[in-house]
Image (cartoon, rainbow, N blue to C red):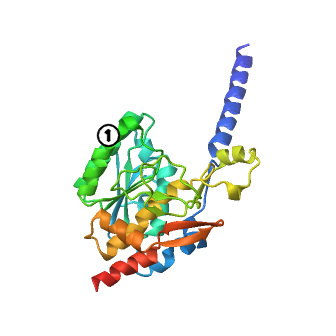
């Protein structure tokens, strides 16, 4: 009887082990390296032309987020700090934060990227974490802060607004999506109408549908919806809308390499003044950032 029980136990352990390994080794995401260097971004924002002049060299950009895969991708970062006390969110899991950092480096390969792990499920604590990350950025003379995630709640806006405004007063440029604080440089996508409940118009438009990572589980669910992938603008399974913030931050890093002495408001004005209007899906999109024009404008001002 004991032998039979032992045999059954071994079989169960074997089956559990096989199941675990299948799940453990299953591909849960697919990476598309250098996604934002494809013709899409270059066509709309003239990234490659701008990179002939500036790459963001020496400019410090703090990415506020989570899941940076810091331990295995240190080559990508100039530094990193965890504000959540959940170190796997900074070090072990490689997902949204890593994607933001790689997107930023594709736009401004010379920039120094800092992983600031502050996001978590408890939104009140997350707000406090973000405030701590901003204080850290001020102390460490970060030039640009970028954030891509859901909009902040009304309850948390007060302390976040105060912290972000403090950073801006220290001449840190912020590029936060879904965040209409007046002095934040607010990006929006190439969409026919404004769907966000902003209190003001977005400042500039950034191409919002490119990606370098796809979640396979979400993709399987997506296929069941019977939609065309090409029409999946800003929805899962791709990380797409979030790219507006790091792309914008990368362009500003290029500008700051040329002239790092302007105020956040002045960088915003230069981008708007050098922006263009384009035709996209049969409608007009205003204030599309032209990285090459913006960099050249500052270059000419320096002469």
66 w.r.t. 123: above or below = below
Residue 44 sits in which quadrant? bottom right
At horizontal 51% and vertical 76% (from top left) the residue drawn is 46
Counting from the top left corner in percent of width and height, residue 295 is at 39, 77
Residue at numbered disc 1: 158
- Regarding residue 38, the answer to whether it shows in the image is no
Q: Choose between 79 and 40: the one closer to the eye.
A: 40
Tell me if 125 is positioned left or right of 166 in this view: right
Q: Quadrant of the C terminus?
A: bottom left
205 w.r.t. 303: above or below = above
Tell me if 287 is positioned left or right of 229 in this view: left
Q: Choose between 209 and 31: the one closer to the eye.
A: 209
Q: Quadrant of the N terminus?
A: top right
At horizontal 32% and vertical 46% (from top left) the residue drawn is 161
At horizontal 45% and vertical 44% (from top left) the residue drawn is 151
Counting from the top left corner in percent of width and height, residue 28 is at 63, 47
**Label tally:** 1
> Tag 1, which secondary structure?
helix
Counting from the top left corner in percent of width and height, residue 214 is at 62, 53
Q: Choose between 44 and 204: the one closer to the eye.
A: 204
Residue that protrudes farthest toward the bottom in the picture: 303
Counting from the top left corner in percent of width and height, residue 136 is at 27, 50
Residue 173 sits in which quadrant? bottom left
- Regarding residue 112, the answer to whether it shows in the image is yes
Q: Residues within 10 Å of mark 1 (few under 14, many from 20)?
A: few
Q: Choose between 77 and 294: the one closer to the eye.
A: 294
Residue that protrudes farthest toward the top in the picture: 1
At horizontal 48% and vertical 44% (from top left) the residue drawn is 150
Tell me if 290 is positioned left or right of 18 in this view: left
């Amino acid at each position: 009887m004991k032998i039979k029980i032992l045999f059954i136990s071994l079989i169960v352990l074997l089956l559990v082990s096989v199941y675990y390994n299948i799940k453990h080794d299953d591909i849960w995401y697919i990476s598309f390296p250098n996604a934002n260097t494809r013709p899409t971004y270059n066509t709309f924002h003239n990234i490659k032309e701008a990179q002939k002049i500036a790459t963001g060299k020496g400019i410090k950009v703090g990415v506020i987020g989570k899941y940076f895969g810091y331990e295995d991708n240190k080559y990508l970062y100039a530094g990193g700090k965890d504000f959540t006390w959940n170190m796997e969110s900074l070090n072990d899991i490689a997902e949204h934060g890593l994607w933001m950092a790689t997107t930023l480096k594709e736009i401004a390969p010379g920039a120094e990227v800092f992983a600031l792990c502050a996001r978590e499920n408890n939104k009140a604590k997350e707000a406090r974490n973000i405030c701590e990350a901003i204080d850290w950025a001020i102390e460490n003379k970060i030039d640009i802060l970028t954030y891509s995630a859901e909009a902040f709640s009304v309850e948390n806006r007060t302390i976040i607004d105060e912290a972000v405004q403090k950073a801006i007063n220290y001449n840190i440029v912020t590029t936060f999506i879904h965040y209409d604080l007046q002095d934040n440089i607010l990006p929006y996508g190439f969409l026919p109408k404004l769907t966000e409940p902003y209190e003001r118009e977005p400042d500039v438009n950034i191409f919002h549908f490119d990606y370098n990572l796809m979640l396979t589980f979400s993709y399987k669910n997506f296929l069941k919806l019977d939609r065309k992938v090409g029409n999946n603008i800003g929805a899962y399974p791709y990380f797409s809308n979030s790219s507006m913030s790091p792309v914008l931050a990368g362009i500003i890093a290029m500008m700051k390499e040329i002239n790092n002495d302007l105020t956040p408001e002045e960088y915003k004005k230069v981008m708007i003044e050098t922006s263009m209007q384009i035709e996209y899906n049969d409608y007009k999109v205003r204030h599309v950032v032209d990285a090459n024009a913006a960099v050249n404008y500052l270059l000419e001002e320096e002469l």
